[in-house]
Amino acid sequence: DEPPLSSRLSNPSRPVFLLGDVPPMEGTPPGKAQLICNKFMHRSRALASDGFVVYDIQDEAGRSDAERPFPFRRLMDSSGYAALLSRSSGKQCLVYKCVADRKFEGWLDRAASDHGHSAINLVGRATSEGEYQGPTLSEAMEMVSERASGPRSIKFGCVCIAERHTMEAAASRGKPYPTEHQNMLRKQKAGAEWFISQAVYDPEPTIRLLRDYAALCREQGVMPRKVVLTFAPVSRKKTMNFIKWLGVTVPPEAESKILEAERPVDASVDLLCDILGTILRECAGIGVPLGVSCESVSIYKAEIDGVHELFRRLQEILLDGRGSPWKVQWVEVMPPAGVSREERALAKQERQLMGAASGGSEYAIATAGLVGVLLGGLLVSAGVVLDGRRRL
C-alpha cells in the first residue's frame, strides 16, 4: 500500500517534493471546480511530486499598511478541494488550515474522517489585530495530536519564517538574538512532524535559521524535523510586489536582476536554483532533512509555466546533492479504493454539468481520462526512484 503523505513528510531519510495549488473561488459549481482541478492535473502530472499542497488563503488585511497587490477573494474550503484533487489525481494533499476558525474542531474531524487527509499544516493569523476566533495555535496543535493515532489518524506540520530570524527582526521585538529556531523546537515538542517555509528569495536568513535550529536540536538531544523550502517564480513587478507584501524578503539586487532581464521568469528560476544550491552548500552536514515545494502566487501563465521548470531543476539539484543514483519513472495510479456509489453518481452529474456548460468538446479535451479516475480509469503519474527503490 502507498504510505500516507504524512509519513513521507516526516521521514528524515528521504527528501519530499510538493507542488502548490489554491482552491477555486467560494461558490464555484461542482462541475467547474472539477474542470479547474483537471486543468491543474494536466499541467502537473508529469512532474515527479510526492503530493500537492492546497493553501488556505486568508484576507490578512492587517499584515501590511501597503495596499494588497491582488484583491482578496474568498475561496473554497481547502480540505474539500484537496479531497477532490486527491480523488481525481491519485496523489495525496497536504492541507493548509488557519486555526483562527471558531469551527476548527469540526473542520478537523471532516478533514480526517470525511476527506481522508493524513497531513495538515497549521498556521496562525498574520496579525493579532481584531477579534480573535477559534483556538490558539497551541490549542489547535493539541487537538490534532489527540487524533494522531487510529484508522483515520492525521498529523500536522507548521510554518517556519526565516524573515523572523534576522538581527533586525530580533531588535524590533526587543530581543538580543532571533528566536524562530526556538519557536520551531517548541512546535516540534507539541507534535509538529515537519515545517514548511514561506517563499525563499534571500538565502542568508534561511541558512541562519537552519543552522541555529540544528544546533538547538543537538543541545536538546532531539532529531530535527524536515524543513520543506518553498520557491515561487516571479516575472513581473505586480507579482514581485505581492511576494514582498506577503512578508518575503527580496534583496534589491535580486529584484533588479529579475525584472530587468529580457525574460524575467527565466531569471527568477535561475536565481532560485542558485539560492537552493547556496543553502545546500552552507548547511551541508548539519543534520536537518530538507524538501522542496514550488508554487505560483498568481494565475499569470508565464509564472505557472515557470513553476514547472523550477520544480524539475530544484528536484535535480536536491537529489544530486544526496550523492546517490536516482531516476524518475512513470507509474499507473489506480483509483482510490472504496469509492462509493454516491461518489460515482456525483461524478456522473459533474460530467453532465461540464458537458452542458462547454458543449461537450472542451470537456472532452479537459477531462479525458481524469474524471474517469472515480469510475475506475487509470491516470499516468510520475514517481521518483531513490537508492534503487521506487518511491512515489
Image (spheres, grey):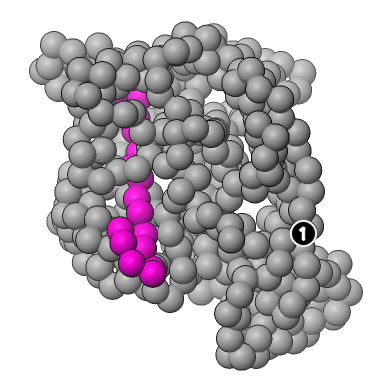
Residue drawn 34% across and 15% down? 211
Residue 57 or 255: which is nearer the viewer?
57
Q: Position of residue 363 (x, y in %)?
A: 81, 73
Magenta span: 148-165
Amino acid type indicated by mark 1? Glu
Residue 178 or 184: which is nearer the viewer?
184
Quadrant in the picture for residue 184: top left
Quadrant in the picture for residue 224: top left
Quadrant in the picture for residue 313: top right
Is 155 contained in the magenta span? yes
Outermost residue, right side? 361
In the visual, does 127 lie left or right of 257? left
In the visual, does 50 lie left or right of 47? left
Is 63 contained in the magenta span? no
Residue 118 or 59: which is nearer the viewer?
118
In the visual, does 189 lie left or right of 372? left
Question: Secondary structure under badge 1?
Answer: strand
Residue drawn 58% across and 50% down? 51
Residue 164 or 196: which is nearer the viewer?
196
Q: Position of residue 91 (x, y in %)?
A: 61, 57
Outermost residue, front side? 388
Residue drawn 67% across and 62% down? 89
Quarter placement of the N terminus: bottom right
Outermost residue, left side? 174
Q: Sort mark 1 into few (<14), some (14-19) or many (20+) by Cα contacts within 10 Å.
A: few
- Res 24 seen here: no
Q: Position of residue 197 (x, y in %)?
A: 42, 33
As displayed, is residue 339 above or below residue 67? below
In the visual, does 363 lie left or right of 238? right
- Res 172 seen here: yes
List the residue tagged with mark 1.
332
Q: Position of residue 198 (x, y in %)?
A: 43, 34
